[in-house]
Amino acid sequence: MSGTIYVINPNSTVRVTKEIDVAVTPLRMAGGPAIECLTLTEGPPGIQSQRDVDGLIPALLKRAAGLENEAAAFVIACFSDPGMHALREQSEKPVLGIAESGVLTALTLGQRFGIVAMLQNSIPRHLRYLGAMGMMDRFAGDLPVNLTIAEMADDALTLGRMIAVGRTLRDAHHADVLVMGCAGMARFREPLERELGIPIVEPTQAAVTMAIGRVQLGWGGRPLRGA
Amino acid sequence: MSGTIYVINPNSTVRVTKEIDVAVTPLRMAGGPAIECLTLTEGPPGIQSQRDVDGLIPALLKRAAGLENEAAAFVIACFSDPGMHALREQSEKPVLGIAESGVLTALTLGQRFGIVAMLQNSIPRHLRYLGAMGMMDRFAGDLPVNLTIAEMADDALTLGRMIAVGRTLRDAHHADVLVMGCAGMARFREPLERELGIPIVEPTQAAVTMAIGRVQLGWGGRPLRGA
Amino acid sequence: MSGTIYVINPNSTVRVTKEIDVAVTPLRMAGGPAIECLTLTEGPPGIQSQRDVDGLIPALLKRAAGLENEAAAFVIACFSDPGMHALREQSEKPVLGIAESGVLTALTLGQRFGIVAMLQNSIPRHLRYLGAMGMMDRFAGDLPVNLTIAEMADDALTLGRMIAVGRTLRDAHHADVLVMGCAGMARFREPLERELGIPIVEPTQAAVTMAIGRVQLGWGGRPLRGA
Amino acid sequence: MSGTIYVINPNSTVRVTKEIDVAVTPLRMAGGPAIECLTLTEGPPGIQSQRDVDGLIPALLKRAAGLENEAAAFVIACFSDPGMHALREQSEKPVLGIAESGVLTALTLGQRFGIVAMLQNSIPRHLRYLGAMGMMDRFAGDLPVNLTIAEMADDALTLGRMIAVGRTLRDAHHADVLVMGCAGMARFREPLERELGIPIVEPTQAAVTMAIGRVQLGWGGRPLRGA
Amino acid sequence: MSGTIYVINPNSTVRVTKEIDVAVTPLRMAGGPAIECLTLTEGPPGIQSQRDVDGLIPALLKRAAGLENEAAAFVIACFSDPGMHALREQSEKPVLGIAESGVLTALTLGQRFGIVAMLQNSIPRHLRYLGAMGMMDRFAGDLPVNLTIAEMADDALTLGRMIAVGRTLRDAHHADVLVMGCAGMARFREPLERELGIPIVEPTQAAVTMAIGRVQLGWGGRPLRGA
Amino acid sequence: MSGTIYVINPNSTVRVTKEIDVAVTPLRMAGGPAIECLTLTEGPPGIQSQRDVDGLIPALLKRAAGLENEAAAFVIACFSDPGMHALREQSEKPVLGIAESGVLTALTLGQRFGIVAMLQNSIPRHLRYLGAMGMMDRFAGDLPVNLTIAEMADDALTLGRMIAVGRTLRDAHHADVLVMGCAGMARFREPLERELGIPIVEPTQAAVTMAIGRVQLGWGGRPLRGA
């Protein structure tokens, strides 16, 4: 039950890691596990393609291997959950991905979920993942703001696009809950929810929440086995 | 962010509430929300039919209304999630049900989930609920131990049945993660997992975990609305 | 095979019961079962929330229990089918719900069905129910007229809204058959069908049709059992 | 509203038509539509392949065209519903198929339906049809008795096989309602239900029930159109 | 491995057969099977209804029977795949349908496929077929150009309509690959793809490709059986 | 249309590459594209985990980049289709994966497909992929022979296991077509089909077939774009 939850930002943009760190602050509780946010310096500045996703996995696994002893759990903080299943094989600790946890959490807040994505070309990748998760029956839509990680540093621009996309998901796609499809959108959760009037899930917060439970309860990454 | 997570056992069997209380103990963190387990004394001794489920909802809603001001969140601790959607309408606080949270959590631990149910006649009710949740693509099977809440007081009998049912779900239905389909099975999670070698989800623990996140993050039961 | 089909309007608005009574008149055949329409006086004036649905079930079950001996079958005439599964447990007679029968009947009249609902907040409840029924593969859309039971007394207003909603379902959601999502819309079936040119299902008529078959054929609410 | 419901047996085996005639007798009500059962003499003795299904459609359409003026509705009494969609195009009267009506009716009697089929090679054809109907989420299994129409004249043999198949569907496939997958099995509905203790749907009865409603209510085969 | 792939155009419009012949020319390889395109002279000029589909099957089967000895494989070149399953029963050679092959091939080129159909009334027939194929999870939309086979002789008119429909499928239905829903659209594949910037599948080419593999590999229409 | 189809075996076992080479020989046609089979020497000896799959992608992409100019198309010859979507981004040439092509081809040969897998722990990975492909409605089962790539060099052992697994898939899971879930099983296709009497798909042959069509038709890996 001791140990640290390592939240690994698999892109190399430290600004995003800092934003994640702020986002998970309310989940740092006295008596609960430590939560540390790390940047995968070997990762790309932003994760914008399947190549980016696949390419960073070896470095991610290596980084996690080095943390294995100290880790209570791992959270992979990129909405494509790169390397999540590989890390589940490698590590004896619980491993959560923010897309998986974010979407599952959304299902407790509405009947049809939408995703506010970064880029158009992420959508087919998301759809493949949602299909793998068996989530298509609850899926309303997935639309991009079409901003790069760099452009997302502009708050007004980004929030404006998110609101526009969110309105379309709510009104034309009938979503009644939204998931923010990027770890670097955390600071917009509250204004977006206030503007749209439907629940907004920040996926890293959703994943760290699940990780805390896993750690406190001693549910391992792998099941117990009889002697 | 202050307030108590009320875990309401909607059946009137105090033994079950006590077991739930033990189960959630690891989730009581010094800096986290208080967690209080209550018995719905107006509920039936065990919830064994759709009539039981539907019949207790008015009392459950009334009990929750009386707790609304002190509540940080509500968890309904019966695997049929009785009154969950009604309570979500009534309360301004987050409301989690253990079946919903348990199944969603299982999806992070395996690809095909099975359910160890109490009674044969619960199965169609579970299936309707899993269909409503859109979970059938990941569903492996749902099999009963066929014991009443009273009989489940016999540990050896109950664990034996759970192991037998779990083996069938694992070997014949190809489940690689199981959810215990009753709040009163919590004490068997660890021995069952050790025996079967696949992850076992205790659903009240799963729901309280989610509730803690909801409370710490200030995600309301209802979204914020613009002024 | 003798006995009466009781069509229970679970809301307390007698005007709606009278409309139902007119709607089922063509199904009263010499040689066929009697059909009696009743108002659940303990029900809410309109059923507009999950709380309304859940809250009326105890009264509905009690009313039905009092009619059990005389009943040939029961039809629950509210589009949320409140208490349908509970009444199937309680009664030895066939029990039909109008949403279930209405949607299933629509599947014989078109490939993608739409629903003309009363209120926006009914939609997630409908979706949960359609998921439980396994109907999402044939589902085109569900849109509200956003009128209360009281407002629906205004024929011109209601029909106008129904036509507008129906056009959207037909043209933007590609529905080729519609189900009217409220027992109190029966009088609009014919003008709506004439206006839209696609089949319109009145769900109470669909359910009573099924009930007649069940009664004439002696198919019980519960299967025969060997001695 | 006047006119006759024509129940067309598309195979040329008169014995089957006679059995259908007996089966629909309880649905002949003094004040309801006439019901006449016909044999498609041009059809094959039994419908045992996709070629049989496709090959009889021209003759079926021709026969129905000759009955169009007198018809109140048509029921196609073969579990492959041969020509159903073609006849819906050709006729202005309601057209029901027994597989479609039988399966939809089963959904009101249980959560997972099984089919007792005649022959092994019918199963893929049934599965394609169930997929087209969008019914796979509720499907438990489809198993054959492997008897020809001729062999099914032996009651003891046929019932024995049906009971064996039904037990497997109930116990190994978890079906809680069965549809008899052939119009010539009607006389076994009651003994099969008594033996298995779960509801059994006779599909011609299900389809004629729906046809009666359609006729009494004046719901045409095609929707009304505005002038 | 010797023999000819017979591509049968089941409509009687020779212009369409000629267009198919041009389309498959690149698939005629010196060392590969011969490919011959035939017109079913007994077929209707265009296949525009379920009656057209069902009605031509006997003639198609007869024609194929006459070719059985010389055939290496059969391709049915109509987007409703008329008689495909019946011909698979009749013939010992591989049988491919262009709708089936076209849709399956599209799944290798995009995540959500759209269909550019000829006529509005084909859509429900297509949907039934896609359901039978289990393809609805990847389906984006199916929209008609609403031109008859005769009108499609006008290139500018047809291409204009196809582009308009394709844009709607791409932009409003989120298709990222399109299948042309008619054998007579082959000449528009390249300009349509250039205009829309997403892959376009010509379904006869897709089916003949699969047939070539089947022939070269000696995979029969029916599996080998042990002696 | 010139160029070579490169079939890349992403494991480093040359024996498997040689077997693939034999398997694709019938698809080498005069007038058709050249087909060359390569071993990814940087790959693991066998691909037995998600880590193996993810870990080889960078090397695979690099190898393919070096072949880009000469390539007419790429086929990735491992049943997990490692790097398929990444290579589709990287290359301007068509990219096929053997799992995708194998499963899609199976859908033309039966209604419910089974997979004969190598190892138990591949199954959840396969299921995620089948979900991403939207194939679960046609899925019968996926069972392992539980042999390593090394053990599979023993023909008698391997074929015996494949037959046993295939029988279970056919008889207990109701599969009527099987896909061999490993590129190194090609030599068993014919004896397995003869033994089981249902079609067996060799997935590399299926993928190369599709690649040939893509090359001959000039359908690029990416759509044409307007000037």
Image (tube, coloured by chain):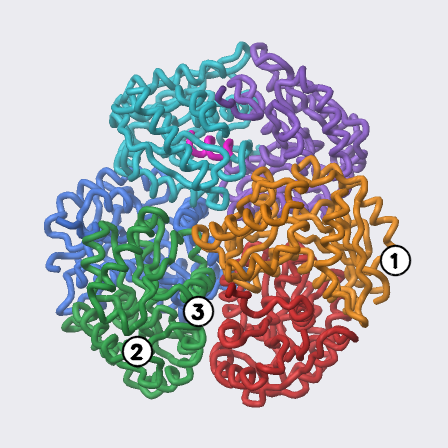
Chain colours: A green, B blue, C cyan, D purple, E orange, F red
Q: Secondary structure at mark 1?
A: loop
Q: Amino acid at mark 1?
A: Glu
Q: Which residue position is annotated with label 2?
A: A8
Which of the 4 image quadrants contains residue F154? Answer: bottom right
Asked if one can make out residue F82 in the rendered structure from this viewpoint, the answer is no
Dominant secondary structure of the residues highlighted in magenta in the image: helix
Crowding near pointer 1: few (<14 within 10 Å), some, many (20+)?
few
Q: Is residue D78 magenta?
A: no
Tag 1 and tag 2 share a subunit:
no
Task: Give the residue number, with chain letter if any, for mark 3.
Answer: B198
Span colored in magenta: C98-106
Looking at the rendered image, the disc whose residue lies closer to the viewer, 3 or 2, is: 2
Q: Chain of mark 2?
A: A
Q: Position of residue F18 (x, y in %)?
A: 70, 84
Count of numbered labels shown in the rendering: 3
Judge left or right: residue B175 versus residue E72: left
* In this rendering, position of residue B67 left or right of residue D224: left
Residue occupying image coordinates x 62% and y 42%: D115
Residue at position x 42%, y 18% in the image: C23
Q: Is D196 or F178 nearer to us in this picture?
A: F178
Observer-nearest of D109 and D37: D37
User: Residue D199 sits in which quadrant?
Assistant: top right
Q: Given this view, does label 1 or label 2 mark the residue nearer the observer?
A: 1
Q: Amino acid at mark 2?
A: Ile
Q: At 30% from the left edge and 78% from the top edge, which residue is drawn? A: A8
Task: Tell which of F178 and A11 is nearer to you.
Answer: A11
Q: Which residue is mark 1?
A: E70
x, y (%) of residue B117? 41, 53
Q: Is residue F153 above or below residue C7?
A: below
